[in-house]
């Protein structure tokens, strides 16, 4: 399973890109709202930091507006993937943009039924929000597993990107449930790398080396 980073912060993206472990970037209106500067300029800068898909979300709620914004976003860079919410207008926009050759990601997906609609509309990615489902007592990983299952018949080249990831365990469970990608907040990426036994082992190596016989 590939990893993307879930942030619009250029410093966080740059730091993660240096590790060599991320293959794309996802943003959303909330993440963009936390950053200074023009939306398009932020997305353009992100495309210069990571050589992979950069997800940028439309704000319009009508299909015509989504298509208009989606074409503008796609024109920023060939790696831009247009994020569109799972609504009837969103499905129409995904269908129209896909016919124009624009890569789309259907976001705020919570069920296999929604994912099937998005794939049939031509979405390149579907993004089930695992954490937000868990937040209200639904099983986010179970929903993701059902989505991966119904999209596994090869009828569409739609990839499942686990979103709203809250912990390293979410990442591992998403991989085991069949996600193609997990988009991971910087905090969770750091948590994935650390383990107390790794730290203890390194400390022991240092201590033993200091006692090395001449
Ligand atoms: O990209 C989707 C993701 O950012 C949403 O995560 O933590 O706001 O539910 P969260």
Image (cartoon, rainbow, N blue to C red):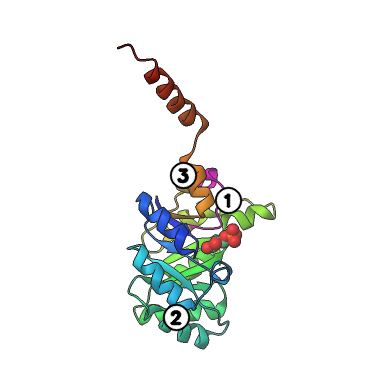
> Dot 2: few (<14), some (14–19), or many (≥20) neighbours within 10 Å?
many
Task: Kindly identify which residue carries mark 3.
Answer: 176
Judge whether 84 appears above or below 64 on screen: above
Say if the magenta span includes residue 165: yes
Question: Image quadrant of residue 130?
Answer: bottom right
Up-down relation of residue 107 to residue 176 (above or below): below
Is residue 60 a member of the stretch shown in magenta? no
Which SS class for mark 3? helix
Q: CA distance from mark 3 to mark 1?
A: 16 Å
Furthest toward the left, the residue is 214
Q: How far apart are labels 1 and 2 at the CA level?
A: 28 Å
Q: Secondary structure at mark 2?
A: helix
Ligand 1 sits in quadrant:
bottom right
The magenta segment is: 162-173
Residue 166 is tagged as: 1
What is the distance, in whole Å, between disc 2 and disc 3 at their CAs? 32 Å
Identify the mark at residue 70; answer none if there is no mark: 2
Q: Position of residue 98 (x, y in %)?
A: 39, 77
Please name the residue shown 46% across and 26% down the image.
203
Secondary structure of residue under mark 1: loop
């Amino acid at each position: 399973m590939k990893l993307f980073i879930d942030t619009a912060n250029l410093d966080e993206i740059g730091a993660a890109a240096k590790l060599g472990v991320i293959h794309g970037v996802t943003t959303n209106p909330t993440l963009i709202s936390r950053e200074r500067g023009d939306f398009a300029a932020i997305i353009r800068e992100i495309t210069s930091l990571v050589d992979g898909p950069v997800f940028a979300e439309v704000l319009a709620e009508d299909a015509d507006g989504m298509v208009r914004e989606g074409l503008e976003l796609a024109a920023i860079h060939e790696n831009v993937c247009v994020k569109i919410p799972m609504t009837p207008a969103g499905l129409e926009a995904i269908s129209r943009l896909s016919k124009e050759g624009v890569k789309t990601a259907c976001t705020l997906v919570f069920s296999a039924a929604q994912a099937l609609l998005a794939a049939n509309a031509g979405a390149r990615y579907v993004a089930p929000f695992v954490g937000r489902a868990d937040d209200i007592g639904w099983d986010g990983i179970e929903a993701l597993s059902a989505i991966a299952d119904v999209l596994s018949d090869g009828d569409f080249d739609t990839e499942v990107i686990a979103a709203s990831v809250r912990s390293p365990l979410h990442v591992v469970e998403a991989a085991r449930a069949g996600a193609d990608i997990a988009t991971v907040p910087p905090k969770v990426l750091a948590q994935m790398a650390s383990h107390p036994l790794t730290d203890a082992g390194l400390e022991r190596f240092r201590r033993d080396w200091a006692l090395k016989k001449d």
